[in-house]
Image (cartoon, rainbow, N blue to C red):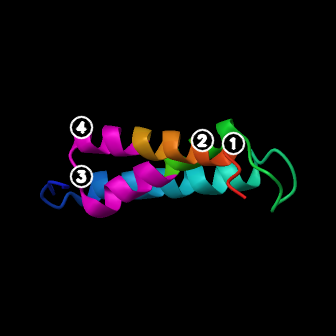
Amino acid sequence: MIERQERNIRRDGVLFLFGLTGVIFVELVASPRAAGSEETAVHGFLFGCSVGIMLSGIFRATNKQALYSTLSLAIGFALSAVINVF
C-alpha cells in the first residue's frame, strides 16, 4: 500500500519530469536496435527505473517507497526482457 505524502508540486513535478525524460531517453537514444526489436536486460532495467520514478511523482510516494518500487519495476522489466515466454 502506498502512503501518500502531502502534495509538493516541485518534488512531484520533478520526479514526473525526470521519469518521463528517462523514458524518452531510453526509447529514443539508448535503444539497442530499431524500434520494435528485441530488448536487452539493461534496456529493460533503465526503462523500469524511469517508469518507477515517474509513478512515484504521480502517486506521491514516500522516498523509501519510491526507492523500493523503482527497483522492483526495474528488476521486473529487466527479467521480462530476457525471459521469452512464447
Q: Amino acid at mark 2?
A: Ala
Mark 1–mark 3 contact, CB under 8 Å? Answer: no
Q: Which mark is residue 78?
A: 2
CA distance for labels 1 and 3: 29 Å
The residue shown at (76%, 48%) is 29
The mark closer to the camera, 3 or 2, is 2
Q: Amino acid at mark 4?
A: Lys
Mark 4–mark 1 contact, CB under 8 Å? Answer: no
Q: Which mark is residue 61?
A: 3
Q: Secondary structure at mark 1?
A: helix
Sooner in the amino-acid sequence: mark 4 or mark 1: 4
Query: Would you say 71 lies left or right of 42 here?
Result: left
Q: Is residue 32 above or below residue 19?
A: above
Q: Amino acid at mark 3?
A: Ala
Q: Which residues are magenta?
A: 51-70
Mark 2–mark 1 contact, CB under 8 Å? Answer: yes
Q: Position of residue 36 (x, y in %)?
A: 81, 62
Query: Would you say 59 lies left or right of 55 here?
Result: left
The mark closer to the camera, 2 or 1, is 1
The residue shown at (53%, 48%) is 48
The residue shown at (33%, 56%) is 57
Q: Which mark is residue 64?
A: 4
Prevalent SS, magenta region: helix
Q: Which residue is mark 1?
A: 82
Sooner in the amino-acid sequence: mark 1 or mark 3: 3
Q: Secondary structure at mark 4?
A: helix
Q: Secondary structure at mark 2?
A: helix
Query: Would you say 52 lies left or right of 84 here?
Result: left
Q: Position of residue 75 (x, y in %)?
A: 50, 39
Mark 3–mark 2 contact, CB under 8 Å? Answer: no
Q: Amino acid at mark 1?
A: Val
Sooner in the amino-acid sequence: mark 3 or mark 2: 3
